[in-house]
């Protein structure tokens, strides 16, 4: 156990300049009046067990490195000025790239090495379900209640996303936990053709196709810099053009589209019909079938990128490089600003469907106290600060103000040229306390939080499925998907109906029904336990 006393001299110098489940799834601010969430900072300052002088406990903390890390030491020092004063905690923060984090953290946990606080990620061995199923995480129910009451109040009902059979094994990142389906189109092309107003009113696949038709046939009349090779391309490396789970969007009218819960299924084989509490097969659903028919019709008309099935480019790059005029993808509120930054173009963005907050989303990113922790109480106290103190949030997201970023009059942050530290705003506790990025608007965090709350929480939130008994079937079904999926969803099929019928038959032969039965039994048991 490492203990030490606060150095008031160091603090002064730095302060001047530094700112119940179904089982387990296989899934794998600176200062000033514009500071977001100032009430949270005041609350954190009043939390118990934090005096300006006294015994300070060190916490060994591990997380994923996304962005620049050269200036980490100064960021860590600035964080500790606050943490030592408010919670008698000093964190030693180690950041690793994705491959190192998966390998090293797996070895450390398996080897019973000290880890007081670890970041949960969507990456295999360091995913929530993998760690919890191997008994590597502590039940922190009482710990959080005692040491982090403000965190509990802040995160509220979303905490249940990391509960298993009534025990809490982590804290989800308090961030945009729901994703929506969007289409976005190049605004400069629409303006040139006088189609912006028509495009902004599109609310159906047929309406979108009408825009595609006009842009497609106007290519020869457009200035060279406005021409695109195709109307739409793949979203990512799996060939998807519009067939994006988890959304039921096969009906022409987008007002009938909706998101659904996958019960943590990372293969997107399974969905739940909320009206009947029944598990369904996404790939056998009417919506999936209709969506691949829409894409096939577009492909035959020349609208779809011919190499969509094999291209590894993202939808954003396809637009940026002039391959495509439009793209369909899952994203969050603020998608327009994010996609404009990624593509370099003014865009018209339209929402197709809204998804609820699900267990899978909650377990993608968060924080847990491993069983190898030596200072779990101190780790929980730091978590309390990380979820309630805007200064700590912005240090961990943006770095040192004036060195790594600056804040404009609107309350937006922008990275400075040569910044030595930066990170993702969804990684560190409470995203809603972080300064929004330049162009998002000073009130972006409030708006996005309200949109998430309006989307609601899935009625199956907190439920996941133990898939140990169907691991063979999952592997076999995934092999079928890997072999046929890209051709079906890209439109690049010479016999769509024949290929689709074979695909469904192969899924059944690989054990799809056993997978669905296992999920249904687990769901029924979980629902019975909620009454």
Image (cartoon, rainbow, N blue to C red):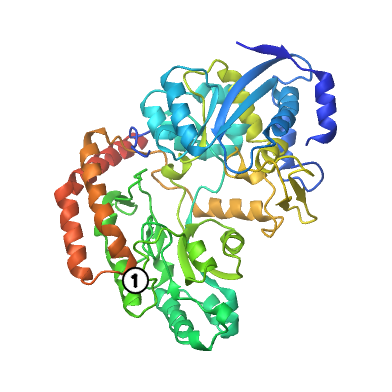
- Tell me the residue at 80%/41% (across/down): 31
Mark 1, Cα crowd under 10 Å, few <14 / some 14-19 / many 20+, is: many
Looking at the picture, tell me which residue is in the foreground, 3 or 479: 479
Residue 471 screen position, x and y as percent: 24, 37
457 horizontally vs 133: left or right: right
In the picture, residue 50 is in which quadrant?
top right
- Tell me the residue at 67%/34% (across/down): 72
Compared to residue 496, the image places residue 528 above or below, namely above
- Tell me the residue at 56%/81% (across/down): 224
Say which residue label 1 marks: 295
Residue 58 screen position, x and y as percent: 64, 18
Looking at the picture, tell me which residue is in the foreground, 213 or 149: 213
- Tell me the residue at 51%/24% (across/down): 369
Compared to residue 216, the image places residue 164 above or below, namely above
SS at badge 1: helix
Q: How many marks?
A: 1
In the picture, residue 136 is in which quadrant?
top left
Compared to residue 21, the image places residue 425 above or below, namely below
For the question of whether residue 370 can be seen, the reply is yes
Q: In this view, which residue lies farthest toward the bottom?
A: 221
Residue 512 screen position, x and y as percent: 20, 48
Residue 466 screen position, x and y as percent: 30, 34
For the question of whether residue 353 can be seen, the reply is no
Location of the N terminus (image quadrant): top right
Compared to residue 312, the image places residue 400 above or below, namely above
472 horizontally vs 220: left or right: left
Location of the C terminus (image quadrant): top left
């Amino acid at each position: 156990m490492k203990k030490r006393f606060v150095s008031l001299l160091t603090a002064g110098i730095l302060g001047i300049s530094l700112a119940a489940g179904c089982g387990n799834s296989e899934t794998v601010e600176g200062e000033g009046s514009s500071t977001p969430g100032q009430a949270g900072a005041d609350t954190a300052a009043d939390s118990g067990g934090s005096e300006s002088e006294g015994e300070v406990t060190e916490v060994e903390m591990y997380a994923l490195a996304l962005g620049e890390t050269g200036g980490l030491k100064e960021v860590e020092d600035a964080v500790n000025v606050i943490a030592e004063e408010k919670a008698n905690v000093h964190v030693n923060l180690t950041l690793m790239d994705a491959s190192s984090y998966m390998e090293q953290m797996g070895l450390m946990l398996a080897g019973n090495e000290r880890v007081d606080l670890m970041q949960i990620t969507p990456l295999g061995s360091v995913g929530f379900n993998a760690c919890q199923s191997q008994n590597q995480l502590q039940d922190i129910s009482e710990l959080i209640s005692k040491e982090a009451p403000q965190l509990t109040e802040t995160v509220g009902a979303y905490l249940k996303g990391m509960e298993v059979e009534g025990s809490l094994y982590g804290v989800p990142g308090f961030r945009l936990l729901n994703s929506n389906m969007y289409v976005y189109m190049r605004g400069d092309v629409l303006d040139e053709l006088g189609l912006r107003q028509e495009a902004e009113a599109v609310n159906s696949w047929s309406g979108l196709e009408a825009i595609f038709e006009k842009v497609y046939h106007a290519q020869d009349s457009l200035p060279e810099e406005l021409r695109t090779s195709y109307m739409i391309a793949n979203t990512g490396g799996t060939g998807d053009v519009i067939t994006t789970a988890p959304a039921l969007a096969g009906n022409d009218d987008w007002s009938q589209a909706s998101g659904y819960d996958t019960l943590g299924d990372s293969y997107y084989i399974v969905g739940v019909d909320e009206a009947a509490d029944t598990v369904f097969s996404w790939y056998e659903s009417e919506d999936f079938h209709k969506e691949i028919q829409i894409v096939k019709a577009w492909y035959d008309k020349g609208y779809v990128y011919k190499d969509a099935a094999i291209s590894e480019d993202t939808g954003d790059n396809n637009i940026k490089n002039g391959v495509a005029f439009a793209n369909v993808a899952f994203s969050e509120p603020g998608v327009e600003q994010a996609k404009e930054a990624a593509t370099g173009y003014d865009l018209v963005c339209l929402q197709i469907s809204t998804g609820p907050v699900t267990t899978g989303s909650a377990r993608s990113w968060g924080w847990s106290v491993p069983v190898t922790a030596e200072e779990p109480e101190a780790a929980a106290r730091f978590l309390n600060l990380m979820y309630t103190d805007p200064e700590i949030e912005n240090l961990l997201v943006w770095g040192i103000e004036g060195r790594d970023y600056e804040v404009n009059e609107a309350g937006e942050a922008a990275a400075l040229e040569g910044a030595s530290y930066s990170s993702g705003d969804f990684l560190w506790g409470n995203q809603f306390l972080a300064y929004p990025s330049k162009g998002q608007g000073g009130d972006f965090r409030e708006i996005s939080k309200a949109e998430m709350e309006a989307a609601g929480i899935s009625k199956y939130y907190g439920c996941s499925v133990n898939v140990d008994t169907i691991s063979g079937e999952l592997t076999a079904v995934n092999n079928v998907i890997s072999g046929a999926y890209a051709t079906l969803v890209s439109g690049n099929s010479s016999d769509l109906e024949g290929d689709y019928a074979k695909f469904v038959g192969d899924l059944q032969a690989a054990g799809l029904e056993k997978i669905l039965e296992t999920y249904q039994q687990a769901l029924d048991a979980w629902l019975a336990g909620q009454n």
